[in-house]
Amino acid sequence: MPHAGLREHLEKGREAYAQRAWADAYALLADADRVGPLEPDDLELLATSASMTGRIDEYLTLLERIHHAHLDAGEGLRAARAAFWAGMTLATRGDLGPAGGWFARAQRLIEREGVDCVESGYLLVPQVYQQLAAGEYDTAYATASRAHEIGERFNDAALVAAGLLLRGEARVHQGLADQGLALLDEAMVAITAPDIPPVLTGVIYCGVISCCEDAFDPRRAQEWTAALTRWCERQPQMVSFTGRCLAHRAGIMQRHGAWDDALAEARVARERCEQAMNRSATGQALYQQAELHRLRGELAAAEAAYRDASRFGREPQPGLALLRLRQGDAEAAAAALRRVLSGQAEPLRRATLLPAYAEAMLAVPDVAEARRAADELGEIAAQSGSAMIGAIAAHVRGAAVLASGDPESAVAALREAVLAWQEMNAPYEVARARLLMGIACRALGDDDGAALELGAARSAFEDLGAPLDVADVDALFGGAPAGDTHGLTARELEVLRLVATGRTNRQIARELVVSEHTVARHVQNIFAKLRVSSRAAATAFAFEHDLV
Protein backbone atom coordinates (compact mmCIF):
# COMPACT_ATOMS: atom_id res chain seq x y z
CA MET A 1 0.00 0.00 0.00
CA PRO A 2 1.47 3.40 -0.83
CA HIS A 3 2.05 5.85 1.99
CA ALA A 4 -0.98 7.91 0.97
CA GLY A 5 -3.16 4.80 1.15
CA LEU A 6 -1.86 3.99 4.61
CA ARG A 7 -2.65 7.52 5.74
CA GLU A 8 -6.17 7.18 4.30
CA HIS A 9 -6.76 3.93 6.25
CA LEU A 10 -5.53 5.56 9.41
CA GLU A 11 -7.77 8.58 8.99
CA LYS A 12 -10.79 6.43 8.24
CA GLY A 13 -9.97 4.17 11.18
CA ARG A 14 -9.71 7.13 13.54
CA GLU A 15 -13.01 8.48 12.20
CA ALA A 16 -14.74 5.12 12.70
CA TYR A 17 -13.33 5.00 16.23
CA ALA A 18 -14.71 8.46 16.99
CA GLN A 19 -18.12 7.28 15.76
CA ARG A 20 -17.90 4.14 17.95
CA ALA A 21 -18.12 1.94 14.85
CA TRP A 22 -15.89 -0.60 16.52
CA ALA A 23 -15.75 -3.33 13.86
CA ASP A 24 -14.99 -0.80 11.11
CA ALA A 25 -12.36 0.89 13.25
CA TYR A 26 -10.74 -2.44 14.04
CA ALA A 27 -10.63 -3.54 10.38
CA LEU A 28 -9.19 -0.25 9.11
CA LEU A 29 -6.63 0.17 11.88
CA ALA A 30 -5.57 -3.49 11.69
CA ASP A 31 -5.03 -3.13 7.93
CA ALA A 32 -2.90 -0.08 8.53
CA ASP A 33 -0.94 -1.89 11.25
CA ARG A 34 -0.16 -4.78 8.89
CA VAL A 35 1.39 -2.36 6.38
CA GLY A 36 3.51 -0.54 8.92
CA PRO A 37 3.49 -0.73 12.74
CA LEU A 38 1.20 1.88 14.24
CA GLU A 39 2.38 4.53 16.66
CA PRO A 40 1.35 3.97 20.32
CA ASP A 41 -1.61 6.39 20.18
CA ASP A 42 -3.11 4.61 17.17
CA LEU A 43 -2.27 1.23 18.71
CA GLU A 44 -4.40 2.24 21.68
CA LEU A 45 -7.31 2.95 19.33
CA LEU A 46 -6.82 -0.47 17.72
CA ALA A 47 -6.62 -2.16 21.13
CA THR A 48 -9.83 -0.54 22.34
CA SER A 49 -11.59 -1.52 19.10
CA ALA A 50 -10.40 -5.11 19.57
CA SER A 51 -11.74 -5.12 23.14
CA MET A 52 -15.10 -3.66 22.19
CA THR A 53 -15.57 -6.29 19.46
CA GLY A 54 -14.79 -9.16 21.84
CA ARG A 55 -11.26 -9.92 20.58
CA ILE A 56 -9.84 -10.20 24.08
CA ASP A 57 -6.74 -12.26 23.26
CA GLU A 58 -5.80 -9.72 20.62
CA TYR A 59 -6.56 -6.88 23.03
CA LEU A 60 -4.05 -8.35 25.49
CA THR A 61 -1.43 -8.77 22.76
CA LEU A 62 -1.90 -5.15 21.70
CA LEU A 63 -1.65 -3.93 25.30
CA GLU A 64 1.69 -5.71 25.59
CA ARG A 65 2.88 -4.00 22.39
CA ILE A 66 1.69 -0.64 23.71
CA HIS A 67 3.45 -1.28 27.01
CA HIS A 68 6.79 -2.02 25.31
CA ALA A 69 6.41 0.88 22.86
CA HIS A 70 6.04 3.30 25.77
CA LEU A 71 9.01 1.70 27.52
CA ASP A 72 11.13 2.11 24.39
CA ALA A 73 10.07 5.77 24.24
CA GLY A 74 11.05 6.29 27.89
CA GLU A 75 7.42 6.88 28.96
CA GLY A 76 7.28 4.75 32.09
CA LEU A 77 3.95 6.01 33.38
CA ARG A 78 2.15 5.35 30.11
CA ALA A 79 3.71 1.88 30.08
CA ALA A 80 2.38 1.38 33.62
CA ARG A 81 -1.10 2.41 32.47
CA ALA A 82 -1.03 -0.27 29.74
CA ALA A 83 0.19 -2.82 32.31
CA PHE A 84 -2.75 -1.90 34.58
CA TRP A 85 -5.29 -2.58 31.82
CA ALA A 86 -3.61 -5.87 30.94
CA GLY A 87 -3.83 -6.91 34.60
CA MET A 88 -7.49 -5.90 34.91
CA THR A 89 -8.42 -7.79 31.74
CA LEU A 90 -6.65 -10.95 32.88
CA ALA A 91 -8.23 -10.70 36.34
CA THR A 92 -11.71 -10.42 34.78
CA ARG A 93 -11.23 -13.68 32.91
CA GLY A 94 -9.91 -15.43 36.03
CA ASP A 95 -6.17 -15.48 35.17
CA LEU A 96 -5.13 -14.10 38.56
CA GLY A 97 -1.47 -15.12 38.44
CA PRO A 98 -0.61 -13.31 35.18
CA ALA A 99 -2.80 -10.40 36.30
CA GLY A 100 -0.74 -10.04 39.48
CA GLY A 101 2.43 -10.05 37.39
CA TRP A 102 1.21 -7.12 35.30
CA PHE A 103 0.13 -5.17 38.38
CA ALA A 104 3.56 -5.75 39.98
CA ARG A 105 5.26 -4.54 36.78
CA ALA A 106 3.11 -1.40 36.77
CA GLN A 107 3.94 -0.76 40.43
CA ARG A 108 7.68 -1.14 39.77
CA LEU A 109 7.51 1.35 36.89
CA ILE A 110 5.66 3.89 39.02
CA GLU A 111 8.22 3.53 41.80
CA ARG A 112 11.04 3.92 39.29
CA GLU A 113 9.57 7.23 38.06
CA GLY A 114 9.54 8.48 41.65
CA VAL A 115 6.81 11.08 41.14
CA ASP A 116 3.30 11.62 42.45
CA CYS A 117 1.09 10.40 39.60
CA VAL A 118 -2.49 9.39 38.77
CA GLU A 119 -1.32 5.88 37.81
CA SER A 120 -0.74 5.14 41.50
CA GLY A 121 -4.48 5.69 41.97
CA TYR A 122 -5.32 3.22 39.22
CA LEU A 123 -3.26 0.54 40.95
CA LEU A 124 -5.47 0.93 44.01
CA VAL A 125 -8.42 -0.41 41.96
CA PRO A 126 -7.35 -4.10 41.95
CA GLN A 127 -6.64 -3.80 45.67
CA VAL A 128 -10.22 -2.66 46.26
CA TYR A 129 -11.58 -5.62 44.31
CA GLN A 130 -9.45 -8.01 46.38
CA GLN A 131 -10.69 -6.41 49.59
CA LEU A 132 -14.32 -6.58 48.48
CA ALA A 133 -13.92 -10.26 47.56
CA ALA A 134 -12.45 -10.93 51.01
CA GLY A 135 -15.33 -9.15 52.78
CA GLU A 136 -13.02 -6.39 54.07
CA TYR A 137 -15.54 -3.67 53.34
CA ASP A 138 -14.21 -0.95 55.67
CA THR A 139 -10.72 -1.33 54.19
CA ALA A 140 -12.15 -1.42 50.66
CA TYR A 141 -14.02 1.84 51.26
CA ALA A 142 -10.88 3.54 52.55
CA THR A 143 -8.79 2.31 49.59
CA ALA A 144 -11.48 3.36 47.08
CA SER A 145 -11.66 6.79 48.73
CA ARG A 146 -7.89 7.19 48.24
CA ALA A 147 -8.25 6.29 44.56
CA HIS A 148 -11.13 8.77 44.21
CA GLU A 149 -9.08 11.52 45.85
CA ILE A 150 -6.12 10.90 43.52
CA GLY A 151 -8.46 11.03 40.53
CA GLU A 152 -9.85 14.38 41.66
CA ARG A 153 -6.39 15.78 42.38
CA PHE A 154 -5.18 14.93 38.88
CA ASN A 155 -8.52 15.82 37.26
CA ASP A 156 -8.80 12.28 35.85
CA ALA A 157 -12.50 11.71 35.19
CA ALA A 158 -12.07 7.98 34.59
CA LEU A 159 -10.43 7.32 37.97
CA VAL A 160 -13.00 9.54 39.70
CA ALA A 161 -15.81 7.45 38.19
CA ALA A 162 -14.10 4.19 39.17
CA GLY A 163 -13.56 5.49 42.71
CA LEU A 164 -17.24 6.40 43.05
CA LEU A 165 -18.29 2.95 41.85
CA LEU A 166 -16.00 1.16 44.28
CA ARG A 167 -16.92 3.41 47.23
CA GLY A 168 -20.57 2.73 46.45
CA GLU A 169 -20.03 -1.05 46.34
CA ALA A 170 -18.21 -0.98 49.67
CA ARG A 171 -20.92 1.11 51.33
CA VAL A 172 -23.69 -1.19 50.06
CA HIS A 173 -21.94 -4.24 51.48
CA GLN A 174 -21.20 -2.41 54.73
CA GLY A 175 -24.96 -2.20 55.17
CA LEU A 176 -25.11 1.54 54.35
CA ALA A 177 -27.28 1.09 51.28
CA ASP A 178 -28.56 4.68 51.01
CA GLN A 179 -25.04 6.11 50.99
CA GLY A 180 -23.81 3.40 48.62
CA LEU A 181 -26.63 3.83 46.11
CA ALA A 182 -26.13 7.60 46.10
CA LEU A 183 -22.45 7.05 45.22
CA LEU A 184 -23.45 4.64 42.45
CA ASP A 185 -25.83 7.22 41.00
CA GLU A 186 -22.97 9.74 41.08
CA ALA A 187 -20.71 7.26 39.26
CA MET A 188 -23.30 6.94 36.50
CA VAL A 189 -23.36 10.72 36.10
CA ALA A 190 -19.55 10.79 36.06
CA ILE A 191 -19.23 8.44 33.07
CA THR A 192 -20.96 10.96 30.82
CA ALA A 193 -17.64 12.88 30.72
CA PRO A 194 -16.24 12.84 27.16
CA ASP A 195 -12.78 11.54 28.11
CA ILE A 196 -13.92 8.34 29.86
CA PRO A 197 -12.48 5.29 28.03
CA PRO A 198 -15.31 3.21 26.51
CA VAL A 199 -14.03 0.04 28.21
CA LEU A 200 -14.30 1.71 31.62
CA THR A 201 -17.75 3.07 30.76
CA GLY A 202 -18.97 -0.49 30.19
CA VAL A 203 -17.32 -1.72 33.39
CA ILE A 204 -19.02 0.97 35.44
CA TYR A 205 -22.43 0.41 33.87
CA CYS A 206 -22.28 -3.30 34.68
CA GLY A 207 -20.76 -2.74 38.11
CA VAL A 208 -23.46 -0.28 39.14
CA ILE A 209 -26.29 -2.54 37.94
CA SER A 210 -24.83 -5.59 39.71
CA CYS A 211 -24.48 -3.61 42.91
CA CYS A 212 -28.08 -2.36 42.69
CA GLU A 213 -29.15 -6.00 42.36
CA ASP A 214 -26.99 -6.92 45.37
CA ALA A 215 -28.72 -4.12 47.30
CA PHE A 216 -32.18 -5.50 46.36
CA ASP A 217 -33.07 -2.26 44.58
CA PRO A 218 -34.93 -3.48 41.46
CA ARG A 219 -36.12 0.00 40.46
CA ARG A 220 -32.58 1.37 40.19
CA ALA A 221 -31.32 -1.80 38.53
CA GLN A 222 -34.05 -1.52 35.91
CA GLU A 223 -33.42 2.18 35.27
CA TRP A 224 -29.68 1.71 34.82
CA THR A 225 -30.19 -1.42 32.71
CA ALA A 226 -32.36 0.68 30.39
CA ALA A 227 -29.53 3.25 30.23
CA LEU A 228 -27.00 0.47 29.48
CA THR A 229 -29.30 -0.86 26.75
CA ARG A 230 -29.42 2.58 25.13
CA TRP A 231 -25.62 2.83 25.34
CA CYS A 232 -25.25 -0.56 23.67
CA GLU A 233 -27.81 0.27 20.96
CA ARG A 234 -25.82 3.39 20.03
CA GLN A 235 -22.89 1.06 19.27
CA PRO A 236 -24.38 -1.75 17.16
CA GLN A 237 -20.94 -3.17 16.31
CA MET A 238 -20.04 -3.68 19.96
CA VAL A 239 -19.77 -7.22 21.40
CA SER A 240 -18.23 -6.66 24.83
CA PHE A 241 -20.73 -5.63 27.53
CA THR A 242 -23.72 -6.58 25.37
CA GLY A 243 -23.74 -10.00 27.07
CA ARG A 244 -23.82 -8.45 30.53
CA CYS A 245 -26.57 -6.09 29.35
CA LEU A 246 -28.65 -8.98 28.04
CA ALA A 247 -28.16 -10.94 31.27
CA HIS A 248 -29.40 -7.99 33.32
CA ARG A 249 -32.36 -7.58 30.99
CA ALA A 250 -33.15 -11.28 31.30
CA GLY A 251 -33.33 -10.92 35.07
CA ILE A 252 -35.77 -8.02 34.78
CA MET A 253 -37.91 -9.93 32.27
CA GLN A 254 -37.97 -12.93 34.59
CA ARG A 255 -39.18 -10.82 37.49
CA HIS A 256 -41.90 -9.26 35.33
CA GLY A 257 -43.10 -12.67 34.09
CA ALA A 258 -41.84 -12.62 30.47
CA TRP A 259 -40.07 -15.97 30.83
CA ASP A 260 -39.87 -16.95 27.16
CA ASP A 261 -38.23 -13.65 26.25
CA ALA A 262 -35.99 -13.83 29.31
CA LEU A 263 -34.70 -17.28 28.36
CA ALA A 264 -33.94 -16.13 24.81
CA GLU A 265 -32.01 -13.12 26.17
CA ALA A 266 -30.11 -15.29 28.67
CA ARG A 267 -29.00 -17.69 25.93
CA VAL A 268 -27.63 -14.88 23.77
CA ALA A 269 -26.06 -13.33 26.87
CA ARG A 270 -24.16 -16.53 27.57
CA GLU A 271 -22.81 -16.63 23.99
CA ARG A 272 -21.72 -12.97 24.07
CA CYS A 273 -20.08 -13.30 27.51
CA GLU A 274 -18.15 -16.38 26.40
CA GLN A 275 -17.03 -14.57 23.26
CA ALA A 276 -15.77 -11.70 25.43
CA MET A 277 -14.00 -14.25 27.68
CA ASN A 278 -15.75 -12.94 30.79
CA ARG A 279 -16.03 -16.00 33.02
CA SER A 280 -18.04 -14.43 35.84
CA ALA A 281 -20.56 -12.90 33.44
CA THR A 282 -20.86 -16.23 31.57
CA GLY A 283 -21.55 -17.98 34.87
CA GLN A 284 -24.24 -15.46 35.74
CA ALA A 285 -25.92 -15.85 32.34
CA LEU A 286 -25.91 -19.65 32.79
CA TYR A 287 -27.39 -19.31 36.28
CA GLN A 288 -30.11 -17.10 34.81
CA GLN A 289 -30.90 -19.82 32.25
CA ALA A 290 -31.01 -22.44 35.00
CA GLU A 291 -33.47 -20.40 37.05
CA LEU A 292 -35.79 -19.99 34.10
CA HIS A 293 -35.66 -23.69 33.22
CA ARG A 294 -36.46 -24.55 36.84
CA LEU A 295 -39.45 -22.20 36.95
CA ARG A 296 -40.73 -23.59 33.65
CA GLY A 297 -40.53 -27.16 34.99
CA GLU A 298 -37.63 -28.15 32.70
CA LEU A 299 -35.70 -29.79 35.51
CA ALA A 300 -33.05 -31.68 33.53
CA ALA A 301 -32.15 -28.56 31.57
CA ALA A 302 -32.04 -26.58 34.83
CA GLU A 303 -29.65 -29.06 36.45
CA ALA A 304 -27.31 -28.95 33.45
CA ALA A 305 -27.29 -25.14 33.44
CA TYR A 306 -26.61 -24.93 37.20
CA ARG A 307 -23.64 -27.27 36.74
CA ASP A 308 -22.34 -25.20 33.82
CA ALA A 309 -22.72 -22.03 35.90
CA SER A 310 -20.67 -23.63 38.67
CA ARG A 311 -17.99 -24.59 36.13
CA PHE A 312 -17.65 -20.89 35.29
CA GLY A 313 -17.29 -19.94 38.94
CA ARG A 314 -20.89 -18.98 39.75
CA GLU A 315 -22.17 -20.41 43.06
CA PRO A 316 -25.22 -22.49 41.99
CA GLN A 317 -27.07 -21.85 45.24
CA PRO A 318 -29.79 -21.14 46.14
CA GLY A 319 -31.20 -22.19 42.76
CA LEU A 320 -29.82 -25.72 42.83
CA ALA A 321 -31.28 -26.30 46.31
CA LEU A 322 -34.68 -25.13 45.07
CA LEU A 323 -34.32 -27.61 42.21
CA ARG A 324 -33.63 -30.37 44.74
CA LEU A 325 -36.76 -29.35 46.64
CA ARG A 326 -38.77 -29.58 43.44
CA GLN A 327 -37.27 -33.05 42.88
CA GLY A 328 -38.38 -34.07 46.38
CA ASP A 329 -34.93 -34.19 48.01
CA ALA A 330 -35.42 -31.80 50.93
CA GLU A 331 -32.45 -33.17 52.89
CA ALA A 332 -30.01 -32.44 50.05
CA ALA A 333 -31.42 -28.92 49.69
CA ALA A 334 -31.16 -28.25 53.42
CA ALA A 335 -27.58 -29.57 53.63
CA ALA A 336 -26.41 -27.42 50.69
CA LEU A 337 -27.99 -24.26 52.06
CA ARG A 338 -26.60 -24.86 55.56
CA ARG A 339 -23.13 -25.13 54.03
CA VAL A 340 -23.39 -21.91 52.05
CA LEU A 341 -24.99 -19.94 54.88
CA SER A 342 -22.37 -21.07 57.39
CA GLY A 343 -19.68 -19.33 55.34
CA GLN A 344 -21.65 -16.14 54.73
CA ALA A 345 -21.85 -13.37 57.33
CA GLU A 346 -22.83 -10.38 55.19
CA PRO A 347 -26.55 -9.59 55.66
CA LEU A 348 -27.33 -8.84 51.99
CA ARG A 349 -25.64 -12.05 50.84
CA ARG A 350 -27.54 -14.01 53.48
CA ALA A 351 -30.78 -12.42 52.27
CA THR A 352 -30.31 -14.13 48.89
CA LEU A 353 -30.08 -17.54 50.61
CA LEU A 354 -32.47 -17.36 53.55
CA PRO A 355 -35.77 -17.63 51.58
CA ALA A 356 -34.69 -20.93 50.01
CA TYR A 357 -33.29 -22.07 53.36
CA ALA A 358 -36.64 -21.38 55.07
CA GLU A 359 -38.43 -23.30 52.30
CA ALA A 360 -36.08 -26.25 52.81
CA MET A 361 -36.62 -26.14 56.57
CA LEU A 362 -40.37 -26.28 56.09
CA ALA A 363 -39.92 -29.30 53.83
CA VAL A 364 -37.59 -31.19 56.22
CA PRO A 365 -39.61 -30.21 58.39
CA ASP A 366 -38.08 -27.85 60.97
CA VAL A 367 -40.64 -25.10 61.44
CA ALA A 368 -38.76 -23.44 64.30
CA GLU A 369 -35.67 -23.00 62.09
CA ALA A 370 -37.83 -21.63 59.29
CA ARG A 371 -39.23 -19.04 61.71
CA ARG A 372 -35.70 -18.09 62.75
CA ALA A 373 -34.84 -17.53 59.08
CA ALA A 374 -37.97 -15.37 58.71
CA ASP A 375 -36.97 -13.31 61.76
CA GLU A 376 -33.46 -12.76 60.39
CA LEU A 377 -34.89 -11.62 57.06
CA GLY A 378 -37.12 -9.18 58.92
CA GLU A 379 -34.08 -7.73 60.69
CA ILE A 380 -32.17 -7.37 57.42
CA ALA A 381 -35.18 -5.67 55.82
CA ALA A 382 -35.38 -3.19 58.71
CA GLN A 383 -31.65 -2.44 58.56
CA SER A 384 -31.43 -2.11 54.78
CA GLY A 385 -34.70 -0.30 54.15
CA SER A 386 -35.18 -2.41 51.02
CA ALA A 387 -38.81 -2.82 50.01
CA MET A 388 -37.87 -6.00 48.13
CA ILE A 389 -36.30 -7.65 51.18
CA GLY A 390 -39.37 -6.51 53.13
CA ALA A 391 -41.60 -8.37 50.66
CA ILE A 392 -39.41 -11.48 50.88
CA ALA A 393 -39.45 -11.32 54.69
CA ALA A 394 -43.25 -10.98 54.80
CA HIS A 395 -43.66 -13.94 52.43
CA VAL A 396 -41.30 -16.19 54.41
CA ARG A 397 -42.89 -15.12 57.70
CA GLY A 398 -46.34 -15.95 56.31
CA ALA A 399 -45.20 -19.41 55.18
CA ALA A 400 -43.52 -20.12 58.51
CA VAL A 401 -46.40 -19.06 60.77
CA LEU A 402 -48.85 -20.91 58.53
CA ALA A 403 -46.81 -24.09 58.98
CA SER A 404 -46.72 -23.52 62.73
CA GLY A 405 -50.54 -23.47 62.88
CA ASP A 406 -51.35 -19.75 62.91
CA PRO A 407 -53.26 -19.10 59.66
CA GLU A 408 -54.64 -15.77 60.88
CA SER A 409 -51.17 -14.27 61.32
CA ALA A 410 -50.16 -15.88 58.03
CA VAL A 411 -52.94 -14.08 56.16
CA ALA A 412 -51.75 -10.71 57.47
CA ALA A 413 -48.12 -11.35 56.50
CA LEU A 414 -49.01 -12.76 53.10
CA ARG A 415 -51.33 -9.87 52.31
CA GLU A 416 -48.39 -7.54 52.98
CA ALA A 417 -46.22 -9.62 50.64
CA VAL A 418 -48.84 -9.66 47.87
CA LEU A 419 -49.20 -5.88 47.92
CA ALA A 420 -45.43 -5.37 47.85
CA TRP A 421 -44.90 -7.85 45.00
CA GLN A 422 -47.72 -6.27 43.01
CA GLU A 423 -46.05 -2.89 43.44
CA MET A 424 -42.87 -4.39 41.94
CA ASN A 425 -44.75 -6.09 39.08
CA ALA A 426 -43.52 -9.54 40.11
CA PRO A 427 -46.39 -11.86 39.06
CA TYR A 428 -44.76 -15.17 40.02
CA GLU A 429 -44.07 -14.00 43.56
CA VAL A 430 -47.63 -12.63 43.79
CA ALA A 431 -49.01 -16.02 42.69
CA ARG A 432 -46.87 -17.94 45.21
CA ALA A 433 -48.06 -15.68 48.02
CA ARG A 434 -51.69 -16.04 46.92
CA LEU A 435 -51.32 -19.82 46.88
CA LEU A 436 -50.30 -19.69 50.54
CA MET A 437 -53.15 -17.25 51.20
CA GLY A 438 -55.56 -19.81 49.77
CA ILE A 439 -54.21 -22.48 52.12
CA ALA A 440 -54.53 -20.09 55.07
CA CYS A 441 -58.09 -19.13 54.13
CA ARG A 442 -59.02 -22.79 53.88
CA ALA A 443 -57.55 -23.41 57.34
CA LEU A 444 -59.71 -20.55 58.69
CA GLY A 445 -62.85 -22.08 57.15
CA ASP A 446 -63.15 -19.37 54.50
CA ASP A 447 -63.79 -21.61 51.47
CA ASP A 448 -64.84 -18.72 49.22
CA GLY A 449 -61.67 -16.81 50.01
CA ALA A 450 -59.60 -19.96 49.44
CA ALA A 451 -61.22 -20.55 46.05
CA LEU A 452 -60.57 -16.96 44.96
CA GLU A 453 -56.92 -16.99 46.03
CA LEU A 454 -56.19 -20.41 44.59
CA GLY A 455 -57.96 -19.63 41.34
CA ALA A 456 -55.98 -16.42 40.94
CA ALA A 457 -52.72 -18.22 41.71
CA ARG A 458 -53.50 -21.01 39.27
CA SER A 459 -54.37 -18.64 36.43
CA ALA A 460 -51.17 -16.67 37.01
CA PHE A 461 -49.06 -19.83 36.98
CA GLU A 462 -50.71 -20.86 33.70
CA ASP A 463 -50.01 -17.46 32.15
CA LEU A 464 -46.39 -17.61 33.23
CA GLY A 465 -45.86 -21.13 31.90
CA ALA A 466 -45.20 -22.74 35.31
CA PRO A 467 -46.76 -26.22 34.92
CA LEU A 468 -45.36 -27.66 38.15
CA ASP A 469 -46.87 -24.82 40.16
CA VAL A 470 -50.20 -25.39 38.41
CA ALA A 471 -49.94 -29.05 39.41
CA ASP A 472 -49.24 -27.99 43.02
CA VAL A 473 -52.52 -26.08 43.12
CA ASP A 474 -54.42 -28.97 41.56
CA ALA A 475 -52.89 -31.50 43.95
CA LEU A 476 -53.71 -29.40 46.99
CA PHE A 477 -57.27 -28.37 46.26
CA GLY A 478 -58.43 -29.97 43.02
CA GLY A 479 -58.09 -26.75 41.08
CA ALA A 480 -58.24 -28.39 37.66
CA PRO A 481 -61.26 -27.47 35.57
CA ALA A 482 -64.19 -29.88 35.88
CA GLY A 483 -65.74 -31.79 32.99
CA ASP A 484 -64.35 -32.59 29.57
CA THR A 485 -62.24 -29.59 28.60
CA HIS A 486 -60.49 -31.35 25.69
CA GLY A 487 -57.13 -30.79 27.39
CA LEU A 488 -57.54 -27.06 27.86
CA THR A 489 -56.41 -25.47 31.11
CA ALA A 490 -58.64 -23.09 33.04
CA ARG A 491 -56.86 -20.07 31.59
CA GLU A 492 -57.05 -21.45 28.06
CA LEU A 493 -60.80 -21.95 28.50
CA GLU A 494 -61.06 -18.35 29.65
CA VAL A 495 -59.14 -17.16 26.57
CA LEU A 496 -61.23 -19.39 24.27
CA ARG A 497 -64.47 -17.93 25.62
CA LEU A 498 -63.17 -14.41 24.93
CA VAL A 499 -61.99 -15.44 21.44
CA ALA A 500 -65.52 -16.75 20.82
CA THR A 501 -66.92 -13.26 21.53
CA GLY A 502 -64.76 -11.83 18.73
CA ARG A 503 -62.20 -10.09 20.91
CA THR A 504 -58.67 -9.55 19.55
CA ASN A 505 -55.54 -10.66 21.39
CA ARG A 506 -54.92 -7.07 22.48
CA GLN A 507 -58.43 -6.76 23.91
CA ILE A 508 -58.10 -10.10 25.71
CA ALA A 509 -54.73 -9.05 27.15
CA ARG A 510 -56.28 -5.86 28.53
CA GLU A 511 -59.21 -7.74 30.03
CA LEU A 512 -57.07 -10.44 31.69
CA VAL A 513 -54.27 -7.99 32.66
CA VAL A 514 -51.57 -10.04 30.92
CA SER A 515 -49.22 -9.38 28.01
CA GLU A 516 -50.35 -9.75 24.40
CA HIS A 517 -47.52 -12.27 23.98
CA THR A 518 -49.05 -14.44 26.73
CA VAL A 519 -52.46 -14.36 25.04
CA ALA A 520 -50.90 -15.32 21.70
CA ARG A 521 -49.23 -18.31 23.36
CA HIS A 522 -52.55 -19.42 24.87
CA VAL A 523 -54.28 -19.08 21.49
CA GLN A 524 -51.62 -21.23 19.80
CA ASN A 525 -52.00 -23.85 22.54
CA ILE A 526 -55.78 -23.84 22.06
CA PHE A 527 -55.40 -24.35 18.30
CA ALA A 528 -52.98 -27.24 18.88
CA LYS A 529 -55.14 -28.98 21.49
CA LEU A 530 -58.39 -28.58 19.56
CA ARG A 531 -56.66 -29.37 16.23
CA VAL A 532 -58.00 -26.25 14.55
CA SER A 533 -56.19 -23.61 12.54
CA SER A 534 -58.22 -20.45 12.96
CA ARG A 535 -60.14 -18.39 15.49
CA ALA A 536 -63.36 -19.09 13.64
CA ALA A 537 -62.78 -22.85 13.82
CA ALA A 538 -61.92 -22.60 17.51
CA THR A 539 -65.12 -20.64 18.14
CA ALA A 540 -67.22 -23.21 16.28
CA PHE A 541 -65.60 -26.03 18.28
CA ALA A 542 -66.29 -24.18 21.54
CA PHE A 543 -70.01 -23.82 20.78
CA GLU A 544 -70.32 -27.36 19.44
CA HIS A 545 -68.79 -28.86 22.60
CA ASP A 546 -70.48 -26.56 25.12
CA LEU A 547 -67.26 -24.85 26.17
CA VAL A 548 -68.91 -21.40 26.08
Image (tube, rainbow, N blue to C red):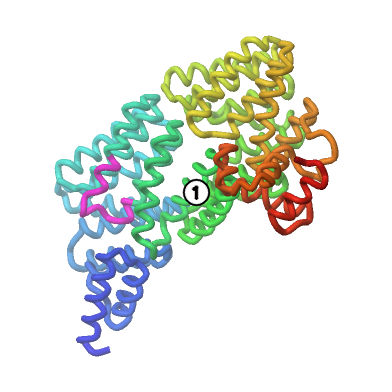
Name the quadrant containing residue 39: bottom left
Crowding around mark 1 (Cα neighbors within 10 Å: few <14, some 14 to 19, many 20+) is many
Name the quadrant containing residue 63: bottom left
Q: Secondary structure at mark 1?
A: helix
Q: How many marks?
A: 1
Residue 312 appearing in the image: no
Residue that badge 1 annotates: 247
Specify the amino acid type for callout 1. Ala
Write the residue at 17% across / 53% down: 113
Residue sticking out furthest to the right: 484
In magenta segment, residue 30: no
In this picture, residue 232 sits left or right of residue 288: left
Residue 43, image x and y in percent?
A: 27, 69
In this picture, residue 75 sits left or right of residue 324: left
Write the residue at 38% across / 41% down: 223
Write the residue at 73% across / 13% down: 443
Residue 229, image x and y in percent?
A: 40, 51
Q: In the displayed structure, would residue 248 be above or below residue 98?
A: above
Write the residue at 74% across / 30% down: 473
- Quadrant in the picture for the C terminus: top right
In this picture, residue 347 sits left or right of residue 512: left
The one of 71 and 15 positioned closer to us in this rendering: 15
Residue 285, image x and y in percent?
A: 54, 49
Residue 399, image x and y in percent?
A: 65, 19
Residue sticking out furthest to the bottom: 2
- Quadrant in the picture for the N terminus: bottom left
**Residue stretch rendered in magenta on the structure:** 187-201
The one of 321 and 531 positioned closer to us in this rendering: 531
Name the quadrant containing residue 396: top right
